[in-house]
Image (spheres, grey):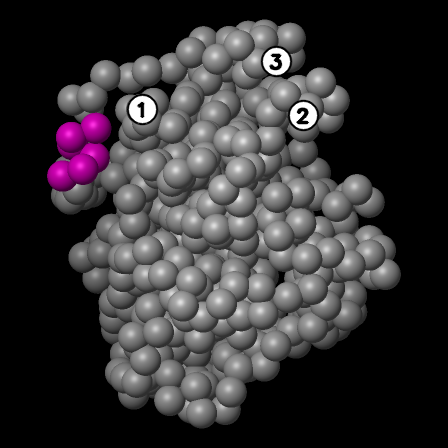
Amino acid sequence: MELYSTNKKECRVSIKEAIFHSLPADKGLYMPVEIPQLKGYFIDNLEKYSFQEIAFEVSNELIGNDIPAWDLKKIVVDAINFDAPLVALDQKTAVLELFHGPSFAFKDFGARFMSRIMAYFSNKDDRLLDVLVATSGDTGGAVALGFLGVPGTRVTILYPKGKVSTIQELQLTTNGKNIRALEIDGTFDDCQKLVKEAFNDITLNQKLRLTSANSINIARLIPQTFYYFQAVAQAKRDGAKEVVFSVPSGNFGNIGAGLLANKMGLPVLRFLAATNINDTVPRFLNSGVYEPRPSVQTLSNAMDVGNPSNWIRIMNLFNNKTEYVKQKVSAYRYTDAETIEAIKTLYEQYNYIACPHTAIAWRATHEYLRTNSGKYQTIFLSTAHPCKFPEVFPANIRSKIQVPAQVIELHKIKKVATKLTNNFQQLKEYLTET
Ligand SMILES: *Cc1c(COP(=O)(O)O)cnc(C)c1O
């Protein structure tokens, strides 16, 4: 796969370059020069393939020229080792549960695949790969567990003190092995700034082989296409003819992967982009003016993004034409009060407990179904297990959440984190001296 930067089309890089240096110098994002088309037989017979077979077929089409089939198969089988079940709520609505991985959020798909691709492209004589990541919650846990025990890699996670949930903090600080947690006395923005400073520091980069695990890495986008195919395969087995996906969106990586899958030949009637009041994209699709704003804190905090970094990729998939985007994507935005209302309705009508992000996606399908007749199935994506956000739920629902055994076990492990201020010199000393 050859990639170009969205800001400078003539710049061409290999997948390896795009994975280890995910930010092009011109501050664009990498996109495939050509979007491969999946074979008609595969698309027409999706329901006959297992999830891992689907993941192999799709990734082979994208990066089969860079990684021989046998190695790619091993990577896929190792990374995609948990299911993405489609659970029907009623005749026209089903939920695609993406939280059955180790950190109980969909980011496990991206992180597990990326870590193995990075290990694959590292040569035996390469120095230790130092992965730096700033997190406001879910990303850090997925990256930590994705890289845990992956040879030749070491992960350093920066998280803002007191600003991640208890379970999220435990997922960051109880791993040991090749994972280190830094508790930063500051905000998420401070953490991100520190990571950026580290990448720009010449002496640090001479000493260490630094790389980033942020959400714009193309190696996180690729595996997120797999479960859209898998969802359609399951829907076909259930007799559905056409599907509409609803995706709870923050940085728009998840829905971006869905749109890429669609461009590769996966039939999808429409995508619903569901946001909280950080509604830069819904406003844009209404007015045609892209006007990012500072992010506002909400109950669905993994979607508190004022300037979604993957939006440029989506515009690119549609030749930068807003009217083309609108032919495929509708946007919805909901307040915290509407989110809680959706959580309650899902529980009362379907006995289903959804995390706040997932509840927002369901609400969009509900609104879409009310205004669009036709024979189609709506599928909303569940991006995290509700146990990760216990403080959001009314007490009667919270008490019904089934907390997985691994999460209960986490509370028994001692937290290990190094406390640092938001001063870059301290981080630099830490990284060079340990
Ligand atoms: C990251 C995240 C999202 C948003 O996904 P994007 O790809 O950034 O749009 C939604 N829900 C949960 C639980 C997340 O962790």
Question: As drawn, is 268 to the left or to the right of 141?
Answer: right
- Pointer 1 local density, CA inside 10 Å: few below 14, some 14–19, many at least 20: some
Q: Secondary structure at mark 1?
A: loop
Q: Position of residue 379 (x, y in %)?
A: 38, 69
Residue 251 visible in the displayed image: no
Residue placed under numbered mark 2 in the picture: 205
Q: Secondary structure at mark 3?
A: helix
Residue placed under numbered mark 1 in the picture: 176
**3D distance between C-alphas at marks 2 and 1:** 24 Å
Q: Which is nearer the N-term, disc 3 or disc 1?
A: 1
Q: Is mark 3 within 8 Å of ligand 1?
A: no
Residue placed under numbered mark 3 in the picture: 428
Q: Residue at x 26, y 83 (%)?
A: 238
Q: Looking at the picture, which amino acid does disc 3 mark?
A: Lys
The answer to which image quadrant residue 53 occupies is bottom left
Nearer the observer: mark 2 or 1; the answer is 2
Nearer the observer: mark 3 or 2; the answer is 2
> In the displayed structure, would residue 354 be above or below residue 246?
above
- Pointer 3 local density, CA inside 10 Å: few below 14, some 14–19, many at least 20: some
- Pointer 2 local density, CA inside 10 Å: few below 14, some 14–19, many at least 20: few
- The majority secondary structure of the magenta stretch comes to helix
Q: Residue at x 54, y 32 (%)?
A: 127
